[in-house]
Amino acid sequence: MDDSEILAFLNKHLQAIQHNDLETYHATTGEDLTLYEWWVTPHRIEGLPFHDFMMEANARRGTVFGAEAGLGGATRFDLANLRLQHYGETAIASYTLLISTETPSGVRVDAHNESRVMVRMDGGWKVVHVHKSPAWQAPHLPPAVEK
């Protein structure tokens, strides 16, 4: 196993999420997925239906993951400070996910820290756990922005 194989898989998985590609998302995600998404709920989320609903809703609105409806422009993601670790048939990717979105007033970049646990099963890799946290030092909420 080498880092390029894991990175190619991870990019395929993240592109599926970004482009509301449920077929590829399901092919790259374990059915028993668990995840923590701090901005959704402070509790563990289990299974695929949660993201299926979000991705189907985004597809109907013509938006992609990370872009607010009505922002209009292109969206991309980058993995800052990426670290890949592998142990037998398990790999862990940790990074800061940067989501850049074109808006009428310029490019907006949102960030959060993320870890994805991947396991080789059924002849390929599957994401089985995701943990996200804020990319700012916070008790829970982002700092107030003065207008």
Image (cartoon, rainbow, N blue to C red):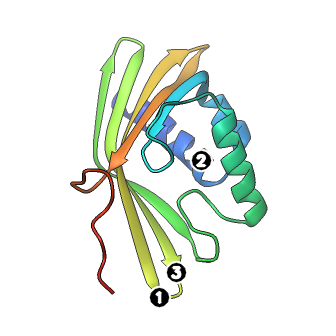
The answer to whether residue 139 of the structure is visible from this angle is yes
Kind of residue sitting beneath label 1: Ser
At a point 59% along the width and 29% down the height, the residue shown is: 29
* Residue 45 percent coordinates (x, y): 54, 32
From the viewer's perspective, tell me whether residue 50 is left or right of residue 120.
Answer: right
Instruction: Tell me the tag on residue 17.
Output: 2
* Residue 147 percent coordinates (x, y): 33, 87
Q: Which residue is mark 3?
A: 103
Measured along the vertical axis of the image, is residue 89 above or below residue 5?
A: above
Measured along the vertical axis of the image, is residue 36 above or below residue 122?
A: below
At a point 57% along the width and 72% down the height, the residue shown is: 74
Q: Which residue is mark 1?
A: 105
> Is the Cβ of the residue at disc 1 closer than 8 Å to that at disc 3?
yes
At a point 53% along the width and 45% down the height, the residue shown is: 14
From the viewer's perspective, tell me whether residue 75 is left or right of residue 131.
Answer: right
The span from disc 2 to disc 1 (Cα, nearest Å) is 25 Å
Which SS class for mark 3? strand
Judge the density around disc 1: few (<14), some (14-19), many (≥20) Cα neighbours within 10 Å.
few
Kind of residue sitting beneath label 2: Ile
